[in-house]
Image (spheres, rainbow, N blue to C red):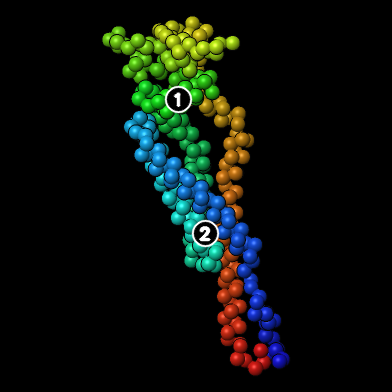
Amino acid sequence: MARRPGAPAAYGEDFSFVSPLVKYLLFFFNMLFWVISMVMVAVGVYARLMKHAEAALACLAVDPAILLIVVGILMFLLTFCGCIGSLRENICLLQTFSLCLTIVFLLQLAAGVLGFVFSDKVRGKVSEIINNAIVHYRDDLDLQNLIDFGQKEFSCCGGISYKDWSLNMYFNCSEDNPSRERCSVPYSCCLPTPNQAVINTMCGQGMQALDYLEASKVIYTNGCIDRLVNWIHSNLFVLGGVALGLAIPQLVGILLSMILVNQIKDQIKLQLYNQQHRADPWY
C-alpha cells in the first residue's frame, strides 16, 4: 500500500533502535562491579565480626570495616540499578544509575582538587593520623605490622622524626617509665644490616636519647611524612594513571547508560508512531 507523502520511512516490525551491544555491555559491566561490591561487603562483615577495631577507631575517623561495608552496599545498589535497568530497558533505573555515577565522579574530582588546594591541611591531618597510630602501636597487631611495613618501605621513623615515638607509652623517655623499651624505637626504624640472618628486634634500644648524628648511624632519623610527600612528588604520573584508571570505568558507565537511554526513547517514539499510523490506509 502506498505511503502518505512526507511521512517518515517505515521500519519493519522487528526493527529496534536499542543496540544489543550497548545493552549487554552495560549489563556485564555492572555485573562485574556488582560481584565486587558483594565481596567488599563480605570482607567488611568478616573483619568486623572477627576483629576488634578499637585501635583502628582511635587512629581513624571511621572504622575501616564499617567503611568497607557502607561503600560495598552503596556500590551494590548502584550497580543493581545498572544491571536491571539495562536488562529490562528501564529508563528510570538507567537515569538513576547515570545520575548517581556522575555525582560520585564529581565528588571524587572535587576531593582531588580540594586536597591539592588545601595540601597544608591535608598534611596536618596525615600527621595527626600518624601520631595517633604511634600512640596505639602496641594495641593492635595489624596496626603494628602496618606501621613497621611503612617505616621499612619508606626508610623513615616516626611522623616528623624518630623522637615522635615518645608519644607511645612504651617508648616514652620519661624517667618514671618502667618499660624495657623506654626511649627506644621499633626495630623497623633500624638501618638494614647486610647478610643478616636473624632480625634484631632490639636494635632501636635507647635511640631517642641520642642526637640525630649518632642515631643516624643505626636508625632512620627522617620522619615518614616528608618521605611520603617526596614519594608522591616523584610518582605523580603513576598516581595520575591510577586516578585515570578509576575514572575511566565511571565515565564508560555514564556514557553507555546515556546512549542506552536515548536508544530506548527512540524505540518508544517508533512504537508510538507505528501504533498511531497502523490504521492509516496511506501508511
- Tell me if residue 6 comes above or below residue 261 in the rendering: below
CB atoms of marks 1 and 2 within 8 Å: no
Front-most of residues 34 and 232: 34
- Residue 160 in view, yes or no: no
Residue at 56% from the left image edge and 66% from the top image edge: 261
Q: Residue furthest left?
A: 176
- Furthest toward the bottom, the residue is 281
Mark yes or no: residue 220 visible. Answer: yes
In the picture, which quadrant includes the N terminus? bottom right
Q: Determine which residue is flagged by label 1.
A: 145
Distance from Cα at disc 1 to Cα at disc 2:
39 Å
Left of 95 or right of it: where is 16? right
Q: What residue did someone put label 2 on?
A: 82
Quadrant containing the C terminus is: bottom right
Amino acid on which the number 1 mark rests in the picture = Asn
Residue 162 falls in image quadrant: top left
Expressed as whole percent of the image width and height from the top left, the position of residue 118 reads 47, 36
- Residue 264 in the image: state x and y as whole percent: 58, 70
Report the residue at 37% width, 22% height from top.
Answer: 138
Tell me residue 161's x, y (percent).
45, 17
